[in-house]
Every structure is written in structure tokens, then in C-alpha cells.
Image (cartoon, helix red, strand yellow):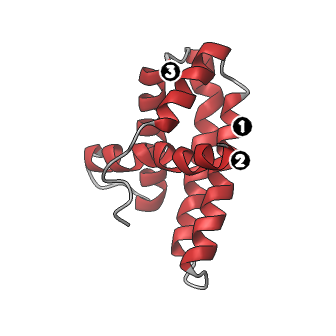
Amino acid sequence: MNHFRLLATGPILMFALICPAQQTPGAPADPGKQHEQSAADGHLRALSERLDLSADQQVKIKPILEQMLAAREKIRQDGSLSNEARQEKQKNLHEKADKQLRQFLNEEQKRKLDQLEQEPHPGLHSN
């Protein structure tokens, strides 16, 4: 069950990577940094809506998302990794982010996140 949660967390945490990338207007000064920020903002928005996060929770969770997305991008760009090694590193990264953000959630929000992690996320596995 715990392995399933970890595997389900990855797509949830990647959910925001798809939406905000399409919503970013203009040409940023640093496209990589802008993408990480917009992806983190989009992911935070999605989590806020689904989990009813307070403003204080959002402030605490956003750096976790930014850090996770930056590390995820480095893993994605590391050509020396096999697909299996890349997946393992991403799994560990998602597990760490999930654990960190859960410390700021109340019990009801944790239950909602558990349910969210169980839902299918079509279109996120096309990489």
C-alpha cells in the first residue's frame, strides 16, 4: 500500500507541471526558473483547491514544491541515468516532498491527499 501511495504521489505532484506551463504569458528572463516557478504556482493552486489550504499553509508548502520541481528537472536532464535509475530518483524525490508537505496538513487534508493520490491521472505518463 505504501509503495502504491509513492507511485501515486508522483503523478499528483506532476499535475501542476502540465497546466501552468501552458498558462505562462510572455517571454521570461530565465525560462528554466520561470517554468519552475509557474509549475510550483500551478501545483500549489491545484493543491490549495483540492485540500482547502490556508494562506499560511501555502506559504510553507510552496518552497517544498519549488525545490522538488527543480530537483526533478535536474534528474530529467541527467543523461547519465538509466530510465530505471531516473524513476527511482524521482520516486525518492516525490516521497520526500510528500512527507515534507504532510507536516503542514491537518488530518482532514491528509485524508483528502490520500484520496487524491489514489485517483488516476491520465495523460501524465506520456513522457
- Determine the CA span between mark 1 and mark 2: 6 Å
Please identify the quarter of the rendering in which residue 49 is found: top left
Q: Residue at x 41, y 43 (%)?
A: 16
Quadrant in which the N terminus is drawn: top right
Q: Which residue is mark 3?
A: 51
Farthest residue to the bottom: give it.
80
Q: Secondary structure at mark 2?
A: helix
Give the Cα distance between marks 2 and 3. 19 Å
Q: Where residue 31 appears, x then y in whole percent? A: 40, 60
- 40 vs 31, left or right, is right
Q: Residue at x 66, y 44 (%)?
A: 97
- Label 1 crowding class (10 Å Cα cut-off): few <14, some 14-19, many 20+? some
SS type, badge 3: helix
What amino acid is at disc 1? Gln
Q: Is residue 91 above or below residue 101?
A: below
- In contact (CB < 8 Å): disc 1 and disc 2: yes
Q: Going 54% across and 77% down the picture, which residue do you hit?
A: 83
User: Which part of the image, by quadrant, shows the C terminus?
Assistant: bottom left
Q: Earlier in the sequence, mark 1 or mark 3?
A: 3
- Residue that sits furthest to the front in the current view: 1
> Viewer-proximal residue, 67 or 104?
104
Q: Nearer the viewer, residue 26 or 62?
A: 62
Which disc is residue 61 wearing? none
Q: Residue at x 43, y 52 (%)?
A: 34
Check the image and report above or below for 55 versus 113.
above
Give the residue type that dot 2 points to.
Answer: Lys
Who comes first in sequence, dot 2 or dot 3?
Answer: 3
Q: Amino acid at mark 3?
A: Leu
Residue at the disc numbered 2: 96
Task: Kindly state the secondary structure of the residue where label 1 is placed.
Answer: helix
What is the distance, in whole Å, between disc 1 and disc 3 at their CAs? 16 Å
According to the image, label 1 marks what residue? Answer: 100
